[in-house]
Amino acid sequence: MDTASFTGFLKTLCIIILIYYAFKFAMRYLLPMLLVKAAKKASENFQQRQQDFYQNNGNTNSSNNTYQDTESANTGKVPRSTKVVGEYIEFEEIDKK
């Protein structure tokens, strides 16, 4: 049966401390660079999606909006919804005595 030696304990402790400081160094200097890179990539992805959206939907929406604007300008009325939602119910407060 092998017994634990003091030198083995010191080696293990040194390795743990070395790993701790290497991890701390990596988190302090490498992680911010990785986060900046990820933020730039997300920003570029968002801008690309926004440009694609405006290119795909911008032409059709602009023609519909101009039609609605000219129609409301010609009649002088603002288009309103004709959907009936429901009737108004008035509630009264009841005092408990």
Image (cartoon, helix red, strand yellow):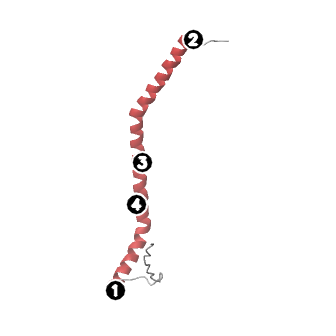
Residue corresponding to mark 2: 5
Which secondary structure lies at badge 1? loop
Q: CA distance from mark 2 to mark 4?
A: 66 Å
Which secondary structure lies at badge 4? helix
Mark before the other along the chain sequence, 1 or 3: 3
Residue corresponding to mark 3: 41
Which secondary structure lies at badge 3? helix
Residue corresponding to mark 4: 51
Residue at image point 42% right, 48% down: 41
Camera-nearest residue between 61 and 76:
76
The residue mark sitting in front, 2 or 3, is: 2
Mark before the other along the chain sequence, 2 or 3: 2
Give neighbour class at mark 2: few <14, some 14-19, many 20+ (Cα, 10 Å).
few
Tags 3 and 4 in contact by the CB under 8 Å rule?
no
Kind of residue at disc 2? Ser
Mark before the other along the chain sequence, 2 or 1: 2
54 versus 10 height, above or below: below
91 versus 75 height, above or below: above
Q: Which image quarter is the C terminus in?
A: bottom left
Instruction: Name the residue at the bottom extreme.
Output: 75
The residue mark sitting in front, 1 or 4, is: 1
**Residue 77: mark in rendering:** 1
Instruction: Name the residue at the front extreme.
Output: 97
